[in-house]
Image (tube, grey):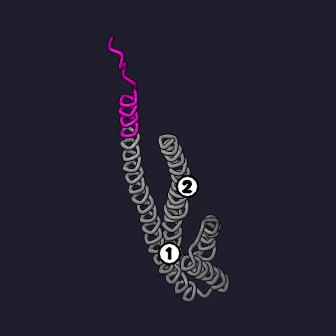
Amino acid sequence: MTAAILLFTVIGLVMLTNMREQRIATRISTAVTSIYEDRLVVAQYILRLSKQMDGIIAILEKEETEVTARINSHLAEVATLTALYGKTILTEMERANFETFKQLCQTISVNNKNGDHTAALSAARNAGDTLQTLSSIQVEEGKNLLDEVLDMTRFSNMISYLELAILIVIAVIIQVLVFASKTLIGIKKPTNENLN
């Protein structure tokens, strides 16, 4: 009877372990996907946006010919990249800086149309600084997600070791019960008292 209870306990423990491991695996998968999609890919967007801003700044600083058309070309690429960036999951701080960046891009566009290249240059420099802030946020958020994954795996490992220890204790108890039951059977065996 006690062995049956221990067996059901082991089965229950294995089932609980399996369910917990599936939940942790799902959370780890979500975090790793977020590290890639919302941090690494976005870092690439930020790099490409920075190159576009550098191009705008270079055009405005040199006061080259056909400034408006060339800046509009850069702004078209910026619009494509910001649309992709906007589809990712953003933190509150990231969202605020991203909105600031988009407003600065609008300011560049308006000032470019009006021919106010000094104001457009100032806005482009501010947009570049905002991109640097966004880049720093990516690094910090990526580190936070990585720490979360490492914490989940550490916790999972600790629980696994605890479960293994419990299973070993249960196995020893079952062995003791089996050995004790064989001993009791050997003691209860009637001996033949008729020696004649």
Tell me the element at label 1: helix
Tell me the element at label 2: helix
Coordinates of residue 102 in the picture (x, y in percent): 62, 78
Disc nearest the viewer among 1 and 2: 2
For the point 39% across and 54% down, which residue is it?
162
Residue 57 appears in the picture as rendered: yes
Residue 152 on the magenta span: no
What label does residue 134 carry, if any?
1
Coordinates of residue 156 in the picture (x, y in percent): 43, 56
What label does residue 152 carry, if any?
none
Residue neighbourhood size for the residue with mark 2, other residues' Cα within 10 Å, grouped as few (<14), some (14–19), many (≥20): few
Q: Is residue 12 above or below residue 32?
A: above
**Dot 1 amino acid type:** Leu
Residue 63 appears in the picture as rendered: no
Q: Is residue 93 above or below residue 184?
A: below
Find disc 2 in the rendering and name its residue.
23
Magenta stretch? Answer: 176-196
Coordinates of residue 88 in the picture (x, y in percent): 60, 65
Q: Is residue 168 left or right of residue 25?
A: left
Q: Is residue 29 above or below residue 136?
A: above
For the point 49% across and 71% down, which residue is it?
50
Q: Main secondary structure of the magenta part?
A: helix
Coordinates of residue 10 in the picture (x, y in percent): 49, 45
Work out how far the residue at label 1 is from the one at label 2, CA to CA, in angstroms: 31 Å
For the point 38% across and 44% down, which residue is it?
173
Q: Quadrant of the C terminus?
A: top left
